[in-house]
């Protein structure tokens, strides 16, 4: 996920020092699972944003905006709100095509 976040930040013109600062928070991040029986051993977090972080909603919006800009056509056929995405098409085939474009773009951003 860090690859997608850094790609999106750069795509939207965030200054490199800030991209590096955010990435330093994610590189090597570890967590534990707390249960009534005690805490688990620490393990590295490799996906998603940090749960409970005030920065996480902003990073989510940055990623969605960058991907949306990659796929935007003449009219806004993608509507983003909070953590929802609505893709508007006239046919089922076109809907499948647009959703696959979204998915493929996320994988390209990770590469």
Image (cartoon, grey):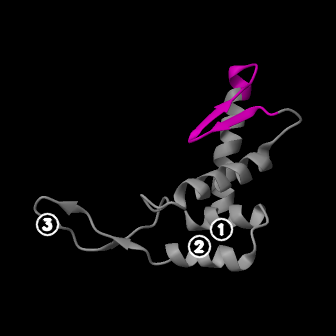
The answer to whether marks 1 and 2 mark residues whose Cβ atoms lie closer than 8 Å is yes
Which contiguous range is marked in magenta?
76-94
Instruction: Give the labeled residue for mark 1.
Output: 6
Position of 40 relative to 89 (above/below): below
Decide which of 95, 10 is in the foreground and name it: 10
Residue 3: image location, x then y, percent:
61, 67
Tell which tag, 3 or 1, sits nearer the viewer.
3
Q: Is residue 89 left or right of residue 21?
A: right
- How packed mark 3 is, by other alpha carbons closer than 10 Å (few <14, some 14-19, many 20 or more), is few
Residue 89: image location, x then y, percent:
74, 24
Which quadrant of the structure image shows residue 63?
bottom right
- How packed mark 1 is, by other alpha carbons closer than 10 Å (few <14, some 14-19, many 20 or more), is many
Instruction: Give the labeled residue for mark 2.
Output: 22
> What separation in Å lies between label 3 and label 1 (alpha carbons)?
35 Å
Q: Specify whether residue 91 is painted magenta.
A: yes
Secondary structure, mark 1, is helix
Residue 49: image location, x then y, percent:
49, 60
The answer to which of marks 3 and 2 sits earlier in the sequence is: 2
Total count of labels: 3
> What separation in Å lies between label 3 and label 2 (alpha carbons)?
30 Å
Q: Quadrant of the C terminus?
A: bottom right
Q: Specify whether residue 47 is painted magenta.
A: no
Instruction: Give the labeled residue for mark 3.
Output: 38
Residue lying at 23% horizontally and 73% vertically, measured from the top left = 41
């Amino acid at each position: 996920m860090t690859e997608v976040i850094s790609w999106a930040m750069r795509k939207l013109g965030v200054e490199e020092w800030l991209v590096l600062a955010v990435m330093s928070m994610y590189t090597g991040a570890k967590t534990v699972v707390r249960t009534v029986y005690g805490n688990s051993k620490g393990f590295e977090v490799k996906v998603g944003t940090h749960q409970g972080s005030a920065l996480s909603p902003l990073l989510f919006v940055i990623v969605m905006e960058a991907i949306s800009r990659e796929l935007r056509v003449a009219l806004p056929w993608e509507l983003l709100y909070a953590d929802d995405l609505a893709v508007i098409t006239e046919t089922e085939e076109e809907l499948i095509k647009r959703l696959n474009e979204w998915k493929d773009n996320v994988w390209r951003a990770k590469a």
